[in-house]
Image (cartoon, rainbow, N blue to C red):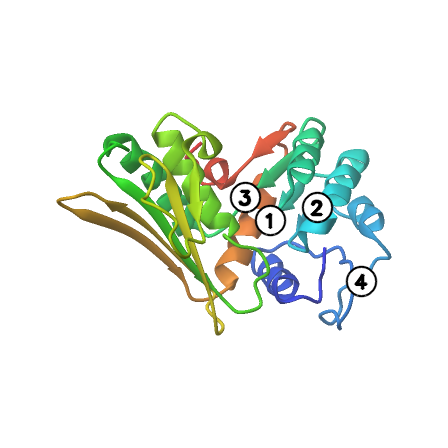
Amino acid sequence: MGIAGRMGRLLAEEVAVAGAVVAGGTLRSGTPPAGIPVLRDAAALLAACDVAIDFTHASTAFAHAAAAAEAGTPLVLGTSGLSPDAEAAVARAAERVPVVYAANFAPGVNLVLALAERMAAALPAESYDAEIVEMHHRQKIDAPSGTALALGRAVARGRGTTLEAAGVESGRDGHCGARGTGTIGFAALRGGQVVGEHTLLFAAGSEQIALTHRGFDRRVYATGAVRAALWLEGRAPGLYDMRHVLGMG
């Protein structure tokens, strides 16, 4: 989906590297890579391929998930910033087809998520404040990033709760009061062409621990998404993430 975009072009290259074939792509604007058929819409693409990869836009996720379920085509979904309705549509699609839905397809990020959960379980919320700082390129339209939110959810799981129940502190400005105990803080930075940086901080009165991942090339996301697409072959319907693909779930 979106074959002429930055991720679409990288995905086409990585599919070829993996020894698979790009059956086609959908196009909203721009020029597709040479030799790749442009199909009229998502339904035509889903009918032509064994698995579809979608890194387009949050506004299309609802329709694409429903179309994948209707076509019976497995789906890899890497679009962030989904609404609750769109996430529900993805979950419904996963009842009929296998879906890998992840906030980030970089293997290192998913290892960081696993570590974040374990660290949160070991460091009491009453003593260790959790803060997540992320920075992305100036064109990114959602904040906090999907990966930052995934880190927050990992911390909450480690503490035996949910992100919503723990409470979120974001965009502090002015006289906003003292930090709430047990809440999870977010700060989003935007500028330049930063591919993606995420740092999880656990700050206590006597020590501070930082866990950081930096992405230097978007290709790592494309490589991970193609790995997920190949992993989906023969899978039963269900909602999977990169932990499953990496053998961690």
Whether residues under marks 3 and 4 lie with C-beta atoms below 8 angstroms apart, the answer is no
From the viewer's perspective, tell me whether residue 25 is left or right of residue 164: right
Where's the N terminus, which quadrant?
Answer: bottom right
Whether residues under marks 2 and 4 lie with C-beta atoms below 8 angstroms apart, the answer is no
Task: Report x, y in % for residue 85.
Answer: 69, 36
Task: Report which residue position mark 3 lands on.
Answer: 102
As measured in the structure, the alpha-carbon distance from the residue carrying label 2 to the one carrying label 4 is 22 Å
Considering every residue shown, the one lying at the far front of the view is 175
CA neighbours of label 4 inside 10 A, class few (<14), some (14 to 19), many (20+): some
**Point 72% across, 28% down: residue:** 96
In the picture shown, does residue 8 fall above or below 172?
below
Residue 13 seen from this side: yes
Q: Check disc 3 and give the amino acid type.
A: Ala
As measured in the structure, the alpha-carbon distance from the residue carrying label 3 to the one carrying label 2 is 13 Å
Q: Check disc 1 and give the amino acid type.
A: Gly
Q: Check disc 4 and give the amino acid type.
A: Pro
Q: Secondary structure at mark 1?
A: loop
**Disc 2 versus disc 1: nearer the observer:** 1
Task: Report which residue position mark 1 lands on.
Answer: 81
Whether residues under marks 4 and 1 lie with C-beta atoms below 8 angstroms apart, the answer is no
**Point 24% across, 39% down: residue:** 128
Task: Report which residue position mark 2 lands on.
Answer: 61
CA neighbours of label 1 inside 10 A, class few (<14), some (14 to 19), many (20+): many
Relative depth, front residue between 70 and 66: 66
Task: Report which residue position mark 4 lands on.
Answer: 37
Relative depth, front residue between 176 and 165: 176
Q: Check disc 2 and give the amino acid type.
A: Ala
Residue 233 seen from this side: no
Mark 3 or mark 2: whose residue is earlier in sequence: 2
